[in-house]
Image (cartoon, rainbow, N blue to C red):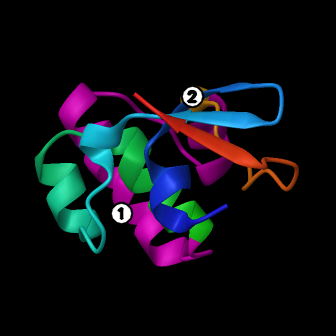
Amino acid sequence: MKRDDFVSTIGYSGNSAIADKKLQKPGTPIETLLELGLYKAAFSKALYDENVHEQEMVLEAYNKASKSSYKSIEELKRLFGVFRVPDKITRVKRI
């Protein structure tokens, strides 16, 4: 699965990912996604890149914006429902 597809995925149906084509802007930096309030997309991008520093940036930004107190990346994974890049996705449907 390509990074932009993973970042813009809003759900799954069998072996297909359902992606929001409005979110598919290649090369959008994490900072921009956070400024736009796209926390799940920012987290997905950081997770795809295996960038722990950026995952922590999302955690901090989300806590600040929502006045929450999530303490770990694992809690964010549960919150956003994003745990890893799925390996059995063969199609992407953009809506």
Q: Position of residue 4 (x, y in %)?
A: 45, 60
Q: Which range is magenta? A: 49-78
Q: Is residue 48 left or right of residue 85?
A: left
8 in relation to 44, above or below? above
Badge 1 crowding class, 10 Å Cα cut-off, few under 14, some 14 to 19, many 20 or more, is some
Q: Residue at x 42, y 70 (%)?
A: 54
Q: Position of residue 27 (x, y in %)?
A: 28, 74
The mark total stands at: 2
Q: Is residue 20 left or right of residue 13?
A: left
Amino acid beneath label 2: Leu
Q: Residue at x 39, y 47 (%)?
A: 41
Going from N to C along the chain, the mark reached first, 2 or 1, is 1
Residue 25 belongs to magenta span: no
Distance from disc 2 to disc 1, alpha carbons, whole Å, reads: 16 Å
Residue named by callout 2: 79
Q: Principal SS element in the magenta part?
A: helix
Q: Is residue 47 left or right of residue 21?
A: right
Q: Position of residue 23 (x, y in %)?
A: 29, 45
Q: Nearer the viewer, residue 53 or 82?
A: 82
Q: Nearer the viewer, residue 23 or 61?
A: 23
Q: Where the N terminus falls, by quadrant?
A: bottom right
Query: Answer yes or no: do the residues labelled 2 and 1 have beta carbons within 8 Å?
Result: no
Q: Residue at x 19, y 39 (%)?
A: 37
The mark found on residue 57 in the picture is 1
29 in relation to 39, above or below? below
Identify the secondary structure beneath mark 1.
Answer: helix
Q: Position of residue 62 (x, y in %)?
A: 32, 41
Amino acid beneath label 1: Met
Identify the secondary structure beneath mark 2.
Answer: helix
73 in relation to 3, above or below? above
